Amino acid sequence: MELLILITAAVLVLSFLSSFVEAALFSTSEHAVAKLADKGSRKAKTLLKIKQDIHRSISAIVILNNISNIGGAFLIGLLSQRVFDSIGIGIFSGVLTFMIILFAEITPKTIGERHALKVSLFFARTVLNLTILLQPLIYVIDFILRPLTKGETIQPEITEDDITFLTRLGKLRGNIDEHELRLISRIFSLNDTTASQIMTPRTVVFAFQAEILIKDALEQVRDKPYSRIPLYQDDMDDIIGVVHLRDILFASIEGKGETPIRSLQKEILFVPETVKAADLLTLFQKDREHLAVVVDEYGGTAGVVSLEDVLEVVVGEIVDKFDRDVDLRVKARTQSEMKNLRKEE
């Protein structure tokens, strides 16, 4: 009787542990494990190896579970015949079946899922050693199943919608605040927004003719909120560079007021209307520039776009307290509508 109880307990414990660890491994996020591994956790590095080839480790656990269950059932069957009569065997089998379902399947899988990361980290080395030990059997099983598992395994793709959904879920659970949610949602729009959508249209672009004197330019820019002003030669379709307000101020202090502003000219970037805001941001960072001329399909000036315009896609409108016009694109549309009304009159 004691041997029967001992073998039954051993079968239940092995089956419990197998289901417990299997459920934990499946429920553990590879992303969470990778973060721990980056911080130097040895257990996490071991677990990451398992997660990257998880089917072998799961196969090892399943093999162990079935060996214990089949072997245990055989021994339990032999011993129960010596201990119980036919009615007792039936009752014992029913109780054992219930115990296996409850204590070797439902309970361990429920606990394993709830404490997935802790359980997986704790048993990582054991699972890896078990996988190495049962490697020959795993290879045999893989060989048998190869015709059924042909083809490349398709890895699930993480899309913008997935990240947005997870972000909203984090907001609902209190892990992400409203401001962070808004920033994460908007940052994806950088790849959907073109220069033509965020530029200042040419009709409201403030620019200098290249031959204007520095003293006259200083007078014109006195009440303007601009730090960088485009320069054009003949008209706005012939922009040749940009001048910085600080250079105008320094030149004026140095007594160069009678000099044409062309002498302060710096190079300016030119970009097509279709360039994405994300690419603009990279371009501004790479060239250490804050302003670019947007060119239309015919090579003419469509407008100008600044680093601030790109940042506003993510953080929203950035308005200086001295800005008279909050949105120059709105001003340009208003001017265009007024011109059309005058033509109709």
Image (cartoon, rainbow, N blue to C red):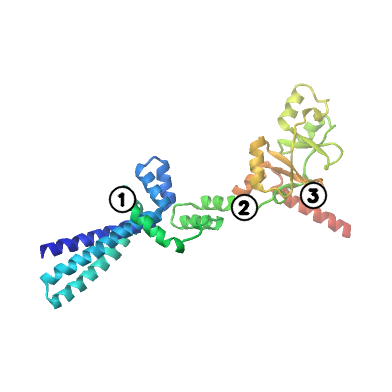
Height in image: 7 above or below 196? below
Q: Nearer the viewer, mark 2 or mark 1?
A: 1
CA separation, marks 2 and 3? 23 Å
Q: Nearer the viewer, residue 136 or 117?
A: 136
Quadrant where the N terminus lies?
Answer: bottom left
Q: Nearer the viewer, mark 2 or mark 3?
A: 3
The crowd level at tag 1 (other Cα within 10 Å; few <14, some 14-19, many 20+) is: few
Element under disc 3: loop
Q: Mark 2 or mark 1, which has the lower sequence index?
A: 1
Q: Residue 75, how many percent across, how many down?
A: 18, 65
Residue at image location 78% in from the left, 48% down from the top: 296
Q: Nearer the viewer, residue 137 or 280?
A: 137
Q: Mark 2 or mark 3, which has the lower sequence index?
A: 2
Residue type, label 1: Leu
Q: Is residue 80 left or right of residue 262?
A: left
Residue at image location 43% in from the left, 45% down from the top: 35
Name the residue that disc number 2 marks: 189
Element under disc 2: helix
Q: Nearer the viewer, mark 1 or mark 3?
A: 1
Which residue sits furthest bottom? 87
Name the residue that disc number 1 marks: 133
Tag shown at residue 297? 3
Q: Residue 33, how many percent across, how many down?
A: 40, 48
Q: Mark 1 or mark 3, which has the lower sequence index?
A: 1
